[in-house]
Amino acid sequence: MCDTVAALLHGGRGPVTLALALALLGNLAAAQTPGPVLVITPSMRDAVSGAGGTLAQMASEGRAVYIAVFGNEEKESAGLDAAATRLGANAEGERAAKILGAREVINLGHKSGELAMLSSSELRNQVMTLTRLYQPEILFFPDWYVHYQDDNDIYRVGRMAEESPYGGSSMFLQELSYLGKRGFAARQYYFFVPYRPYRAREGGEGPATMKQVDIAPVMARKLEAILACATANERWAADVRRRSGRAALATPDLVRAFTEELAAAVGARHGLRFAEEFNHLRPRPGLPEHVREKTRKKAP
């Protein structure tokens, strides 16, 4: 490609050849640009805790990172009313996303803690719409398969986000197809667990693989981003102080210690200082197994 462009620039004549060369250069740049990332999450703190380091790395690679927050986060505070909690958490989420290098935060504004009251089809349609708008190569969302998870919003958001690629055809949401936003589906999927490591038999089965990401180079940015989620941190830290009986523990110290310990526990499995881990799905080369098993064997 580069040789062709050089030959056109040096040996060609006239504006048509120059235009062709510029078009080839544009196509080459597009092919080398990493694709966008779309994050689907109930709250900003969930995304930062489960995938903040990996998102910071991807942003540093030149990927456009977009974060869609489905909950309004009105209940995650200590001593604030719902309106103050929502406004504080949304503003802090914007700061956290900026620290990670994300380009945009989309706050859907559904009532946190009550996502089970909404139609899964409605939520999926919103993910499909965002997918058509941003056309991500990679989709992040909470892993709703993990056991003993007491946050129903994580379960609901993760489940409908995983189901959303089934609507990647232009036959879904045809009103968007008529407006020029045709069907689209991501090529890679990262399932993340926000607040604990994966356990045995919770991943890497079937078509999925367990993917570890070394986040030591960006650990400082992840810490800065999660510390920016101050309103939600206060609620979490108040629960820790109550359960531990240690009222003197400072919120920033608790958040920093927990985040570092979580990253270190995941990293220790793979000989890394700090890491994040994901159930990872991506296209596999060759024919699918369900096609291969129907093929006829060649006679000897």
Image (cartoon, helix red, strand yellow):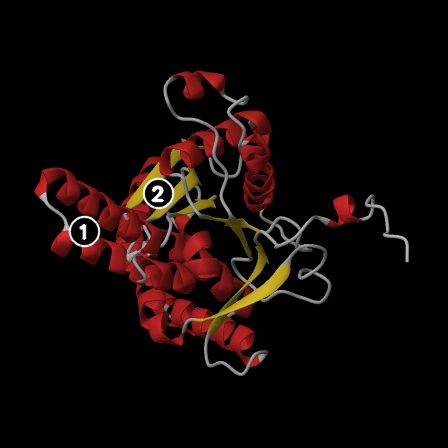
Ranked by sequence position, the earlier of labels 2 and 1 is 1
Q: Is residue 170 left or right of residue 219?
A: right
Q: Nearer the viewer, residue 59 or 235?
A: 59
Q: Position of residue 98 (x, y in %)?
A: 26, 54
Question: Which of label 2 and label 1 is nearer to you?
Answer: 1
Q: Nearer the viewer, residue 158 or 271?
A: 271
Q: Amino acid at mark 1?
A: Leu
Is 80 located above or below residue 169 in the figure?
A: below
- Considering the numbered disc 2 on the image, is that residue within a helix, a strand or a loop? helix
Which residue is tagged 2?
85
Q: Position of residue 284 (x, y in %)?
A: 61, 54
Is 200 located above or below residue 160 in the figure?
A: below
x 41%, y 34%: residue: 130
Residue 8 - label:
1
x 54%, y 83%: residue: 271
Instruction: Looking at this view, name the residue that lies furthest to the bottom.
Output: 271
* Badge 2 density bin: few <14, some 14–19, many ≥20, Cα 10 Å: many
- Can you tell which quarter of the image residue 175 is in? top left
Q: Is residue 188 left or right of residue 201?
A: left
* Residue 181 shows in the view: yes
Is 265 located above or below residue 156 in the figure?
A: below
Q: Amino acid at mark 2?
A: Thr
Q: Nearer the viewer, residue 65 or 6?
A: 6
Quadrant for the N terminus, please: bottom left
